Amino acid sequence: MTIGSLDYRIFHAVDEFETIGVVLYAAAVVVLWLATEPGEERRWKIAALSGAASAGLALLINQAIAQIWHRPRPYEAHPQVYHLTKSHDPSFPSDHASAAFGIAFGIYFIDRRVGKFFLVVAVLIGFGRLLVGAHYLTDVLASVVVAAIAAGLIVRFGTPLLIRLAVLLERITDPLVTPFHQRMRRHSPSN
């Protein structure tokens, strides 16, 4: 294997991560919700809802910005630049990075310990957007700002609503995950 083919494989793996990894990242938010044992403190459930709501708000803010300024993507502005992405929506700010950082900040502002994991993955997603040529650095940095603002607004003003929503949604999910949690408790080393 040559250095060139190894480089391309790594480059292609980053592109795959940008596609599949983002889906797995969003699934991790659902896992965070389901990891809370019924009857336990709702912190992770509220964090999951906060992350999802923050990502949604960040994407709405991006849409408003796109109506004002349609910045071409790097490969549109510079056709000679190699890229793997095919998107033609505005480059500024990055939707992928805004959603990833919206999730991360939304979770981090509720639970810093778990939020750190989501922040690390959001940084990887943001870096990947640069590496595959989908965005400029300022697109990703703007996404970080948009996401932080969105998460701050959600946590500051939306937490009472998130708590009520968690209580409603857990009526559906808790009965579904109770057998799993009971099985895990029976097989834990402390029992």
Image: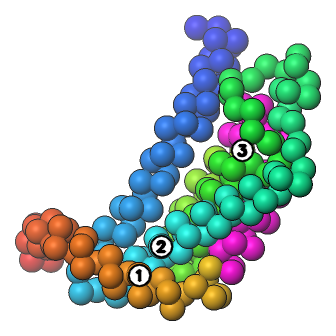
| Mark 1 nearby-residue class (10 Å; few <14, some 14–19, many ≥20) | some
Q: Residue at x 48, y 54 (%)?
A: 26
Kindly tell me whether residue 181 is visible in this rendering: no
- Identify the amino acid type marked 1: Leu
**Looking at the image, is mark 3 or mark 2 earlier in the sequence?**
2
Q: Is residue 179 visible?
A: yes
Q: Residue at x 87, y 44 (%)?
A: 70
Disc 2: which residue: 49
Quadrant where the C terminus sits is: bottom left
Relative to 118, is 157 above or below? below
Instruction: Report if the CB atoms under discs 1 and 2 are less than 8 Å apart.
Output: yes
Q: Residue at x 80, y 42 (%)?
A: 90
Reading the image, the residue beneath label 1 is: 165
Q: Is the residue 111 above or below the residue 56 in the image?
A: below
Label number found at residue 127: 3
Residues in magenta, as a range: 128-153
Comparing 72 with 36, the one in front is 72
- Most foreground residue, 62 or 45: 62
Assess whether residue 75 is covered by the magenta stretch: no
Pinpoint residue 21: horizontal percent, then vertical percent.
51, 42
